[in-house]
Amino acid sequence: MTISTEANPHLPEKVRPYWTANGKALDRFNKFCKADSRIDSILLPVYDGLTLIKWRDVGSATNGSNGSNGHNGHNGHNGD
């Protein structure tokens, strides 16, 4: 994933590596979001793209959790 001269002929060559690295990082992030079964994500066609991400609702009936984010509502303390 690079920003070619044909795609953006007005981008100065000295900043092209910076924007190419940002594009590659964004591509890795989007692939991570797509592959992670704990989250739902959607890419909206707003400006250059807007990604909305939320915890997947696993439902309290399937795993006994109290919240919609897949966590059981406990903070790690045993109540002492």
Image: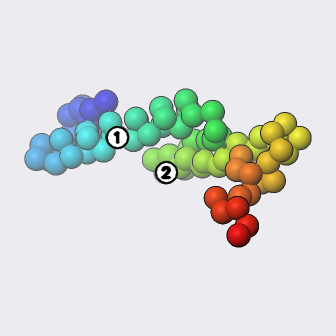
Q: Position of residue 59 (x, y in %)?
A: 83, 43
Q: Amino acid type of disc 2?
A: Tyr
Residue 7 appears anywhere in the view: no
Indicate how the structure is coloured in the image. rainbow
Residue receiving disc 2: 47
Q: Position of residue 5 (x, y in %)?
A: 20, 34
Q: Is residue 31 left or right of residue 13?
A: right
Q: Earlier in the sequence, mark 2 or mark 1?
A: 1
Q: Amino acid type of disc 1?
A: Ala
In depth, the one of 4 and 22 nearer the eye is 22
What is the quadrant of the C terminus in the image? bottom right
In depth, the one of 10 and 4 nearer the eye is 4
Q: Nearer the viewer, mark 2 or mark 1?
A: 1
What is the quadrant of the N terminus in the image? top left
In depth, the one of 50 and 64 nearer the eye is 64
In the rendering, which numbered label is found on residue 25? Answer: 1
Q: Position of residue 30 (x, y in %)?
A: 48, 37
Label 2's element? loop
